[in-house]
Image: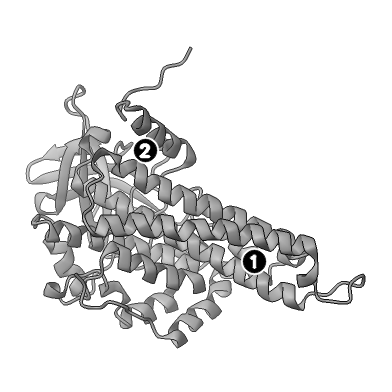
Amino acid sequence: MSTLTVPRLNDELLNRCAERAATYDRENRFCQEDFDELKAAGYLLLTVPPEFGGKGLTLAEMAKETRRLAYHAPATAVCLNMHHYWVGLAADLYRSGDHSTDWILERAAQGDVFAAGHAESGNDIPLLYSTTTATHVKGGYRFQGRKSFGSLTPVWDWLGIHGMDASDPDHPKIVHAFMHRDTAGYHIKQTWDVLGMRATRSDDTILEDVFIPDNYVSRVVPAGFGGADYFVLCVFAWALMGFANVYYAIAQRALDLTLEAAKKKTSIALQHPMSHHAEIQHGIADMILELDTIGPHIEKIAEDWSNGVDHGGQWPEKLVSAKYHAVESSWQIVDRALDLSGGFGMFKKSELERLFRDARAGRFHPANSALTHEIVAKIGLGINLDEQPRWG
């Protein structure tokens, strides 16, 4: 268990993050000041176990901290979630008696920053398959490929990547490894000019010929769901529950802005503020009813994971469904908030306009809708997750 039951970032720090969010978005630049302040405040050490010098937050505890930051600065919370899902993974492995990634905890405790390099064009099943090639050579692997959505691009020290070793075509393997920033054979291409979550600055990373030694190769597993061991499942747990809480926070912020505005908004046809209008009340009720379903769902899944509840083969379904629920409900709530804004939400100076774009970005985060539905249906039907779909 953690040594910090209710960690609280300084309210003044969070308010400064909130004040900078619009500028980062408008200028499409990395949340550098947020990052520097949060790192100095110990935010990047929250999931490092006490034995390594951190606070030892579990997934359930860290999820609430992610949500609290995301309420003020969603993009900042998203990119720092990438760091925590590697450190949280290593902490879970450590607590389970697997010390293969203890070096991540040691490096994180010394201030190193970890980021994720999994997204690839043409690969809608990240982690489990790859368009990046991994070639086994003496002492390690060589990687060639292109990674999109490379989180924390300006500041990462280590980029978690994966590639496919197809040297045995009948038994392809996925190689999970970590590339240090000083590694030769790669370059970063500035591609990040996107709809939402702009302050994450998630540029592409081109792996031209990257050698990673064996001591930074964490797993070599069969391709597909059959290779989803505890290491891979931990990635899904920490990444998806972090995403879920970011979008939950966006929905809460959109509701709060709508409630505040409705009490002040007037109409030439009404004697009272618009909060007394029946249809405004109806819309707000819809938002609250939708929001109330998110929290209990994602908190239960995070708590079950942290408490070691044995859901067996249902864990993939439970993780993707929680993230899907949070993202889809958040989108509905923010979209409704824009309806109720009376047109003000269309203006760039409106926070709702930015939240609307940020909320839409949630559907791009894995697992996407198609993969989510496939996983949920196959597990419900008892079908092998690696079975190919049949048509006709």
Residue closer to the observer: 33 or 351: 351
Q: How many marks?
A: 2
- Residue 133's disc is none
- Residue 352's disc is 1
5 over 161 or under it: above or below: below
What percent of the width, then of the height, locates residue 198?
A: 52, 62
Q: Specify few, some or many for label 2: CA neighbours under 10 Å numbering under 14, 14-19, or 20 or more.
A: some
Q: Image point 42% across, 62% down: which residue?
A: 78
Within the image, what quadrant is residue 142 found in?
top left
Considering every residue shown, the one lying at the far bottom of the view is 12
Whether residue 139 sits left or right of residue 196 in the image: it is left
- Residue 125's disc is 2
Q: Image point 13% across, 73% down: which residue?
A: 52
Whether residue 342 sits left or right of residue 76 in the image: it is right
What percent of the width, then of the height, locates residue 381?
A: 36, 27
Query: In which quadrant will I find the N terminus?
Result: bottom left
Q: Is residue 196 visible?
A: no
What percent of the width, then of the height, locates residue 211?
A: 18, 48
- Which element type, helix, strand or loop, lies under badge 2? loop
